[in-house]
């Protein structure tokens, strides 16, 4: 599959899978989230006590709701109209249908700059650097960026340790998800390089661990605007 077709299929999958995704998130059916990744991102956010937070690829909006409950004003953007509808119906923030590649041209719609920007398992495509550059333009100079993603060591599975497109079938949830999702696997080195090229300085690389097995549950990158 070409890169263009993979990016298209990735984006449309989130419309097809919106109802299934909303159900598994709201019913706490993603084991790694319950085991620690939800707590890791909420804790990383609340430690910074943000005033204005942008949730990039917000899905059905759970993180925006968690952050506004903790006192932040939060905006969520996502490409999937049905997921934004679900988020809006649940309330707790302002939600906008927006693709990452529209961030630069539509940034006025997002209002004042954000002192915290979060991407929670929402960087799935190959094109990351332009998005990071656009996010730099909507961040305050003293702001921060949190990216939580699959851990490259665990997500590699049996495939080579090399950047490339993979396919998520959501088979762990039976037949609930109508569409499979192409996604772009990045090595740790590629993550670090892309964050820097995108105009951000890496401050920390955290690895939340499974409380019982000790295996990494995710990779959590913390970055600040490059000066
Ligand atoms: C795995 S879900 C994570 C959702 C949410 N952050 C959470 O923690 O539940 C990935 C989200 O990224 C969004 N997304 C993927 N590519 C996108 C793009 N190019 N522009 C906007 N949203 C995108 C999808 O629509 C989906 O809601």
Image (cartoon, rainbow, N blue to C red):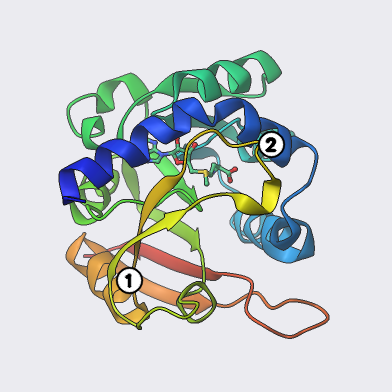
Report which quarter residue 197 is drawn in. Answer: bottom left
Residue at the outermost right position: 212
Q: Is residue 184 left or right of residue 68?
A: left
Tell me residue 159's x, y (percent): 40, 78
Q: Are marks 2 and 1 in contact (CB under 8 Å)?
A: no
In the rendered view, tell whether residue 44 sits above or below residue 53: below
Mark closest to the chain's N terminus, 2 or 1: 2
> In this view of the protein, can residue 137 be seen by the observer?
no
Say which element carries label 1.
helix
Q: Relative to residue 212, is residue 183 drawn left or right? A: left
Task: Locate residue 64: give its quadrant.
Answer: top right
Q: Name the residue located 78 percent from the left edge and 57 percent from the top edge.
A: 34
Tell me if mark 1 has few (under 14), some (14-19) or many (20+) residues whose alpha carbon lies within 10 angstroms of its own. Answer: some
Q: Residue at x 21, y 61 (%)?
A: 199
Q: Which of the labelled discs sits on residue 157, or is there none?
A: none
Residue 54, how many percent across, how many down? 46, 38
Tell me the residue that label 1 is attached to.
191
The CA distance from mark 2 to mark 1 is: 31 Å
Q: Give coordinates of residue 70: x percent, y percent.
A: 72, 40
Examine the rendered structure and indicate whether residue 127 appears above or below residue 104.
below
In the rendered view, tell whether residue 115 sits above or below residue 220. above
The quadrant of the image that shows the C terminus is bottom left
Mark 2 lies on residue: 71
Q: Is mark 2 on a helix, strand or loop?
A: loop
Which marked residue is nearer to the observer: mark 2 or mark 1? 1
Q: Residue at x 35, y 82 (%)?
A: 160
Judge whether residue 94 can be spotted in this image: yes
Q: Which residue is drawn at 60% across and 30% down?
A: 60
In this orientation, which residue lies closer to the viewer: 146 or 62?
62
Ligand 1 closer than 8 Å to label 1 CB: no
User: Can you say whether 188 is above or below 79 in the image?
Assistant: below
């Amino acid at each position: 599959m070409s890169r263009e077709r993979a990016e298209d299929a990735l984006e449309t999958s989130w419309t097809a899978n919106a109802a299934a995704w909303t159900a598994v998130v709201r019913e706490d059916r993603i084991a790694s989230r319950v085991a620690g990744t939800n707590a890791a991102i909420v804790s990383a956010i609340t430690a910074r006590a943000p005033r204005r937070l942008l949730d990039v690829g917000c899905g059905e909006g759970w993180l925006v709701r968690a952050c506004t409950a903790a006192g932040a004003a939060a905006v969520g953007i996502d490409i999937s109209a049905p997921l934004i509808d679900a988020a809006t119906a649940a309330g707790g923030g302002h939600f906008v249908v927006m693709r990452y590649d529209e961030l630069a041209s539509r940034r006025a719609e997002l209002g004042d700059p954000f002192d915290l920007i979060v991407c929670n398992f929402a960087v799935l495509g190959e094109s990351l650097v332009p998005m990071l550059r656009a996010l730099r333009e909507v961040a305050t100079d003293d702001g921060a960026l949190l990216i939580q993603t699959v851990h490259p060591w665990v997500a590699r599975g049996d495939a080579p340790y090399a950047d490339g497109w993979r396919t998520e079938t959501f088979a762990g949830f039976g037949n609930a998800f109508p569409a499979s999702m192409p996604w772009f696997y990045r090595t740790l080195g590629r993550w670090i390089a892309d964050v820097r090229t995108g105009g951000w300085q890496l401050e920390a690389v955290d690895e939340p661990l499974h409380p019982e097995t000790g295996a990494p549950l995710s990779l959590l990158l913390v970055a600040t605007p490059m000066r």
